[in-house]
Amino acid sequence: MGLRLQTKATALLFLGVLGLMACGSSSPEGHEMPDAAGLDLANASRNYAMKCAMCHGEDGKPVLATAPDLRTSNMTVEERVAIIAYGKGTMPPHRNTLDMPSIRGLAVYLDKFTD
Ligand code: HEC
């Protein structure tokens, strides 16, 4: 009886340690998981801050006079993907500096400004 209890306790302890290890590997610094649509919006947020905010502003409110206000833009996600990838006028193309999943991620991320 005593031995069985001890075995059980050891097994529980072992599971506990496994659980801790699993938690440890999903630390905030760990790799961000893409959301259900396969988009990495945390990555999009970083890209926006580094590559878009200097013209379009942190929250879509333009810094550059000629940049459209992304809060009132009514482009579809597909149209955004096209303009982000290929550029237009002073809007620079990003197809050589961002991969397609990142461009798509940004196009979806912009929805956050139009809410
Ligand atoms: C150098 C400044 C600049 C940067 C950097 C820039 N844009 Fe633009 N963006 C513009 C300008 C200017 C336009 C308007 C282009 C036109 O219609 O002639 C524009 C247009 C757009 C549009 C179309 C909006 C509409 O409704 O017409 C989207 C979407 C957009 N930019 C997203 C982005 C994203 C995402 C990034 C970062 C990857 C980015 N832009 C980086 C200047 C910039």
Image: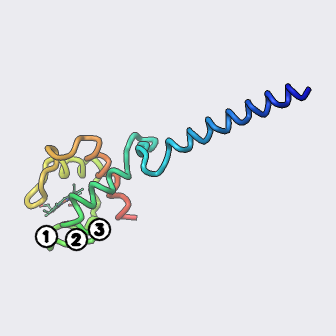
Residue ID for mark 2? 62
Report the amino acid beneath label 3: Glu
What is the C-alpha distance between the residues marked 3 and 1? 16 Å
In which quadrant of the rendered image does the N terminus lie?
Answer: top right
What is the C-alpha distance between the residues marked 3 and 2? 8 Å
Residue ID for mark 3? 58
Q: Is residue 51 above or below residue 14?
A: below
Give x and y (percent) for residue 2.
89, 29
Report the amino acid beneath label 2: Pro
Secondary structure at badge 2 equals loop
81 or 53, which is in the foreground?
53
Secondary structure at badge 1 equals loop
Within-10-Å neighbours for mark 3: few <14, some 14–19, many 20+: some
Q: Residue at x 38, y 52 (%)?
A: 42
Q: Is residue 113 above or below residue 102?
A: below
21 or 96, which is in the foreground?
21
Report the amino acid beneath label 1: Thr
Residue ID for mark 1? 66
What is the C-alpha distance between the residues marked 1 and 2? 8 Å
108 or 72, which is in the foreground?
108
Give x and y (percent) for residue 105.
32, 48
Left or right position of 30 against 61: right
Q: Is residue 59 above or below residue 23?
A: below
Mark 1 CB within 8 Å of ligand 1 = yes
